[in-house]
Amino acid sequence: MKCPNCGHLEDRVLDTRIGKEGETIRRRRECLKCSGRFTTMETLLQVYPMIVKKDGRREVFNKEKVLRGIQAACQKRPVSLAQMDQIVERVAKWVWSRPEREVTGEAVGQKVVKELRLVDDVAYVRFASVYKTFKDVGEFVEHLEEQSQDEGFGSPNA
């Protein structure tokens, strides 16, 4: 670390404190040349995975974009912002834990659909109808029935 007073490159750490969220570290340092004291903050830089879109474009994973999609699906539904944030955090954790550095947008969408299904059926249907491109209502209903049977929920009419 370069001393802000004299520019010397060697110092010693006097004190280390971890931030409230555990994401930053504050270090109090003393220059070994001029004895000047200064504080540094350290944060972990996360390498965000790339999302591969349907058209082949790649973009950096963006939690805000996921939250906007979930908020649109949950509009006028009894789903709190805290619940939506928890879904976003679970999806983000899932994306970051993937061994591959590229994840398809479809895989992220499927994860959001599964999470929304546990919270609110209407929000789940809204998100699924936008995230998947269906030719008509019949194809959409067929997809919902398949999902229900695959997950052991039985018929959606039951």
Image (cartoon, helix red, strand yellow):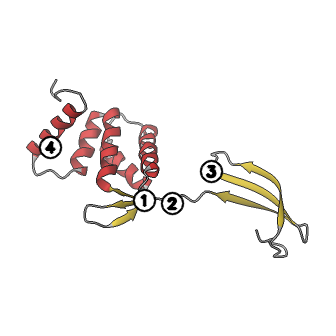
Q: What residue do we see at 73% from left, 54% from top? A: 26
Q: Secondary structure at mark 3?
A: loop
Question: From what the image shows, is residue 19 above or below residue 124?
Answer: below
Q: Secondary structure at mark 4?
A: helix
Q: Name which of mark 1 and mark 3 comes first in the sequence.
A: 3
Q: Residue furthest front?
A: 99
Q: Locate the C terminus and report the quarter of the image it occupies.
A: top left
Q: What amino acid is found at the position of numbered circle 4 in the picture?
A: Phe
Which residue, given by chain and number where applicable, does mark 4 sit on? 140
Q: Which mark is residue 101?
A: 1
Q: CA separation, marks 1 and 4?
A: 31 Å
Q: Name which of mark 4 and mark 3 comes first in the sequence.
A: 3
Q: Name which of mark 2 and mark 3 comes first in the sequence.
A: 3
In this rendering, the label closer to the viewer, 2 or 4? 2
Position of residue 140 measured from the top left corner of the image (x, y, whole percent): 14, 43
Q: CA separation, marks 2 and 4?
A: 36 Å
Q: Nearer the viewer, residue 8 or 124?
A: 8
* Label 4 Cα neighbours within 10 Å, binned few <14 / some 14-19 / many ≥20: some
Q: What residue do we see at 30% from left, 46% from top? A: 110
In this rendering, the label closer to the viewer, 1 or 3? 1
Q: What amino acid is found at the position of numbered circle 3 in the picture?
A: Glu
* Label 2 Cα neighbours within 10 Å, binned few <14 / some 14-19 / many ≥20: few
Q: Which mark is residue 23?
A: 3
